[in-house]
Amino acid sequence: MKLAQLKGLIHQAAAEREITPERMVQALEDAIAQAARKHFKEKGVQAKVDLETGEISCLRVRQVVATPEEVKNPTEAITLEEAQKLDPNVKVGDTLVLGELDAEQLGRIAAQAARQMLFQRVREAERDNIHREYSQKIGEMVNGIVKRIERGDVIVDLGRTEGILPKREQIRSERFNQGERVRAVIVEVTKDANKPQVVLSRTSPMLLVRLLEMEVPEIFDGTVVIKGCVRAPGERAKVAVTSRDREVDPIGACVGMRGTRVQAIMRELKGEKVDIIPWSPDLVTFVQAALAPAKVNRVRVDEEVIEEPLRDAEGKVAVDEEGKPITITKRRPVMEVVVSSEQYSMAIGKNGQNVKLADKLTGCKIIIKTEKEVKDEISSALAALLREVEGELAEEMSEKEEAPAAVEYDLVIPLEDVPGISERMRERLTEHGISHAQALANTPAEKLMEIPGIGPHSAAKLIEAAKQALEAQVASRSEE
């Protein structure tokens, strides 16, 4: 069967649909083959379209298999033995052409089926093109017009296709009307045939980044660099910036003359307050800046070990052979930030918003404390330490009282009355809490050896001298 001007029609349709002529020809061949299979009741049918001649042919074909058991349908497959009777050079896996079917026998019903199949294949090709084109634009900002609203989701006309702005990706306070212009970033492109493929977002931090690139020439040309951006959509955002040129103030460039640049962005984001803060490689300095407008008195740095799920290139959680999530161990900085009582509420922010955003921006765990809280913690720690020391002292005293080696004397003899102890040695002993003969006699030699200038021999002599002095005094009292 020949169709005049087929080449021109194919090229025209391909141009209108923005798909390649080759894809259009493939769609046409699939549609004709499907219609022929239904009409001739054979599965083994292929269609061929020759653009140059306009010739359309339907071929009876069979897939060559090795054994009869593999022939599930005789109109679809043929054994190698039977196939080689028709073509000795055929091999397993080849497609054997048995002959040509009369395409002109296809009736009106078959033609309608072919038409439906063609439209389906063309739509698939269009979806593939849109997926390929917009997948490269993920993270980019697009302008569109609100076409309709379906159960809270906003359908946006993007020109070539429609995008969907799901309710979860909308700023909570905003409302849309049909025909209204809207800006959003592309966050996902799907292949779903039942709804728009391009998923948009107005809550993504990337939207704020793109708006800054549009409003601030210094960011667009790379002089000012955005190092981080976090948002509580519709309420507050924090952007960390730095400059590659010492002559350019990154904060001033983003804010603009009298705040014109940042105010334009805030209007686009329905009044979302945007804090522009200076980025610093020093984490403590960066944390202090991130907590603005609160003033920080001091920061204590610590770290903690955390476990996070391992994610692949697409952001999906990786799992092991048993289907359990794979986790990795990381060390995260912990910043204990001390502020005055007056600054505490500002540092925390409404519903903890300020500290949560600073936490995300810096990648640290931030703990806010007041000066009073820190003083109370120190007092509690000191009290606990004193209780521990008192307990240890009481235990030592108890052990000394129970020690059988200790000799108890009820006499107090000053060290001056103990023969053989020099004045310099008395001073050393007194400095270490040994001021009389009884204390010296009951002090272990190892304890005395801790005093500078006293060795094993000297310690033994001192203890012996003290005991002799005490015993002499006891004997003297007995005689009296």
Image (cartoon, helix red, strand yellow):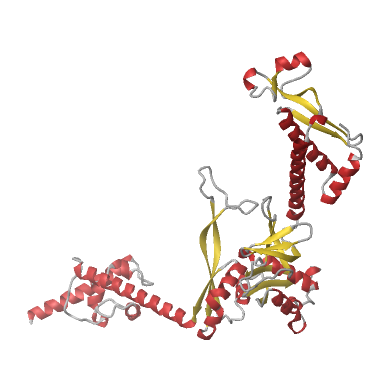
Look at the image and tell me whether residue 313 can be seen: yes
In this view, the residue farthest toward the bottom is: 342
Q: Is residue 20 left or right of residue 62?
A: right
Residue 380: x percent and y percent? Answer: 38, 77
Q: How many numbered discs sit on the rendered protein?
A: 0
In this view, the residue farthest toward the front is: 108
Quadrant of residue 97 within the rendered picture: top right
x 80%, y 39%: residue: 28
Q: Is residue 443 left or right of residue 351?
A: left
x 73%, y 58%: residue: 162
Residue 472: x percent and y percent? Answer: 16, 76
Q: Is residue 78 above or below residue 39?
A: above
Q: Is residue 361 left or right of residue 389?
A: right
Quadrant location of the N terminus in the rendered image: top right
Q: Is residue 479 above or below residue 315?
A: below
Residue 178: x percent and y percent? Answer: 71, 68
Q: Is residue 428 left or right of residue 231?
A: left
Q: Nearer the viewer, residue 170 or 341?
A: 170
Quadrant of residue 284 within the rendered picture: bottom right
Q: Nearer the viewer, residue 223 or 236?
A: 236
Residue 164: x percent and y percent? Answer: 68, 60
Look at the image and tell me whether residue 279 can be seen: no
Q: Nearer the viewer, residue 60 or 87?
A: 60
Quadrant location of the C terminus in the rendered image: bottom left
